[in-house]
Amino acid sequence: MSPRDLADAVARDYADIFGEEPAGVWFAPGRVNLIGDHTDYNDGFVLPFALASGVAVAAGRGGDGLTVWSRQWPGDLVTAAVDELAPGRLDGWPAYPLGMAWSLARAGYRPGDTSIAIDADLPAGAGLSSSAALECAVGLALADLHGLRVVRPELVRLASKAENEFVGVPTGIMDQSAALLCQAGNALLLDCRSGTSDDVSLEPGAAGLAILVIDTQIRRALTDGRYAQRRRSCEAAAVALGVASLRDLPDGPDDVAGLDDPELRRRARHVVSENRRVLAVADLLRRGELAAVGVLLTESHASLRDDFEVSWPEADVAVETAIAAGAVGARMTGGGFGGAVIALAPLAALADIGSALSAAYGRRDWPSPVIASAVPSHGARRLR
Ligand code: GAF
């Protein structure tokens, strides 16, 4: 679905539910992370780009407090007064939009009464950052509707705070940064320590290539504890090595040799090597050498699978199969334990890769993966 069609659909839902036209519709995209996973909360580097799919929010002033409705969970119409919002009081999907309102209010940007309808053309739990898209679309809507002057980097910070403190997942800043800061035709090279970012041109079609997003159909939730456990291991490794964060190990994987615990050593080695790969990929992109990025993507997957241990069997099969069928590189993307794989492939190989993936999954009695070509797209914006 195009963002315009999604905007029309959510505006119709809003009118049906709240009995009037919305004041506007705002949209925030999901993201694919080209490379740099589990580096953001280690103060490191990431290189995501925005998808054309995402979350649309139709909103209007008025009502009694904040009322949210979602097409993806159509049974629930949830209302809360801004002043009653507090971490731990809400579970499930309403924690994301209402957590955003809480985060804005706590920073002094108090939103007035608002009714909100939500729709998405992005699967939840697929590693494509639907939750950050939801927070960011709601954040933009509340800011615009109530004249709150929040600049985008500040909105990134407040959306991350909503996720960390209100929803209670200790994520980094990559997904909210991608949703709010990405530009069409570019990936975003983000330094997660300083918060500074650079657009790096990424136009696979112009190079005769495509970036396939292969949804392995395995779903995961970052709230299940394994993500938080990885983050704790990284923090423990940094303490043991006497650095503020794993970002501060500049000399590469040898830097982690001082860790006695083999598991911590593997976790830290992933982060240190991944940071170097992100910078190497950004350099190749700047030189217009997109195909050469493939080998680094595949190395990143091996590191996430063997050292960081966040891959899953369907992802490993997708990576191997895509490469055997002609992709120049492939990797899981996002937090892991389920979700999507990306493959960088020549346009001429796409049909073979699609059939090889269906066959490989079929042989294992797995449901077919859902495959789409991703085009680096615009970040969050008002659609009407
Ligand atoms: C999830 C988190 F939300 C991000 O902050 C990031 O850590 C990612 O997993 C792994 O790179 O998407």
Image (tube, grey):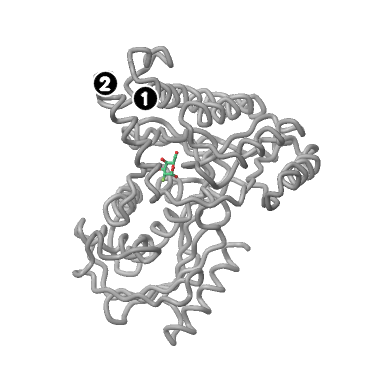
Image: 357 above or below 292: below
Compared to residue 179, the image places residue 45 above or below, namely above
Q: CA distance from mark 2 to mark 1?
A: 9 Å
Residue 343 shown left or right of residue 60 in the figure: right
- Tell me if mark 2 has few (under 14), some (14-19) or many (20+) residues whose alpha carbon lies within 10 angstroms of its own: some
Q: Is 134 situated left or right of 366 in this image?
A: left
Q: Quadrant of the N terminus?
A: bottom right
Q: Residue at x 42, y 31 (%)?
A: 45
166 vs 377, nearest the viewer:
166
Which quadrant of the frame does ligand 1 lie within? Answer: top left
Task: Give left or right: position of 31 versus 145.
Answer: right
Q: Which residue is mark 1?
A: 264
Tell me the crowding category of disc 1: few under 14, some 14 to 19, or many 20 or more residues within 10 angstroms, Cα based: many
Question: In the image, what residue type sits under mark 1?
Answer: Leu
Which element type, helix, strand or loop, lies under badge 2? helix
Task: Indicate if the residue with disc 1 has its beta carbon within 8 Å of ligand 1.
Answer: no
Q: Please state the total of marks drawn on the protein image.
A: 2
Instruction: Find numbered disc 1 in the image and state the secondary structure of the residue it sits on.
Output: helix
What residue does disc 2 label? 240
Q: Are marks 2 and 1 in contact (CB under 8 Å)?
A: yes
Q: Which of the 4 image quadrants contains residue 321? A: top right
Which residue is found at the position 38% from the left and 51% from the top?
223
Q: Residue furthest bottom?
A: 19
* x, y percent for residue 267: 41, 27
Nearer-N-terminus badge (2/1): 2
The kind of residue on which mark 2 rests is Ala
Measured from the top left, where is residue 358 in percent x and y?
A: 75, 47
Identify the residue shown where x is 56% and y is 27%: 302
Taking depth in this image into account, of 9 and 233 the one nearest to the observer is 233
Q: Position of residue 96 (x, y in %)?
A: 36, 60
